[in-house]
Image: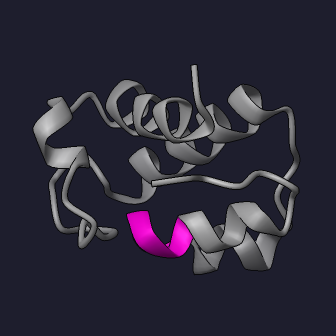
Amino acid sequence: MTNLEKYRKAFIDALEIEEEKVEIEELAYQDIPQWDSVGHMGLIAELEDTFDIMMDTDDIIDFNSYKAGKEIMKKYGVVIGE
């Protein structure tokens, strides 16, 4: 499984959404009911477990979209390909 597949799966599993919603690069915090503050922390936990990382508080706060998340993950050595 590629990093992109793992990344997408984390969104699907943590937010309990259909795969089609993850395909949207513009998916952002609070765009869907599932990505509220509780869903956000679940997503962060899922990503940390999946990639065996621990995000800084500032990065957790800045992780406000699917696209922004890809850039933040690079800080932790996780490159999310297309």
Q: Residue furthest top?
A: 1
Figure check: 75 above or below 33: below
Q: Is residue 80 left or right of residue 43?
A: right
In the rendered view of the protein, which quadrant contains the N terminus? top right
**Between residues 56 and 9, which one lies in front from this camera angle?**
9
Image quadrant containing the C terminus: bottom left
- What residue is drawn where x is 33% and y is 31%? 12
Confirm whether the magenta stretch covers residue 62.
no
- Which residues, given as a range, are shown in magenta? 64-69
The residue drawn where x is 24% and y is 73% is 26
- How many discs appear? 0
Residue in the picture at 19% in, 32% down: 19
Residue 36 x %, y %:
33, 57
Q: Position of residue 24 (x, y in %)?
A: 19, 59
Q: Is residue 30 above or below residue 38?
A: below
Specify whether 60 is left or right of 56: left
Colouring mode (rainbow / by chain / secondary structure / one colour): one colour
- Is 4 on the left or on the right of 62, as rendered? left
Main secondary structure found in the magenta portion = helix
From the top left corner, tell me how far across and down residue 51 is, in percent: 76, 34
Asked whether 17 or 7 is in front, the reply is 7
Task: Examine the rendered structure and indicate whether residue 20 appears above or below residue 55.
Answer: above
Query: As drawn, is 5 to the left or to the right of 46?
Result: left
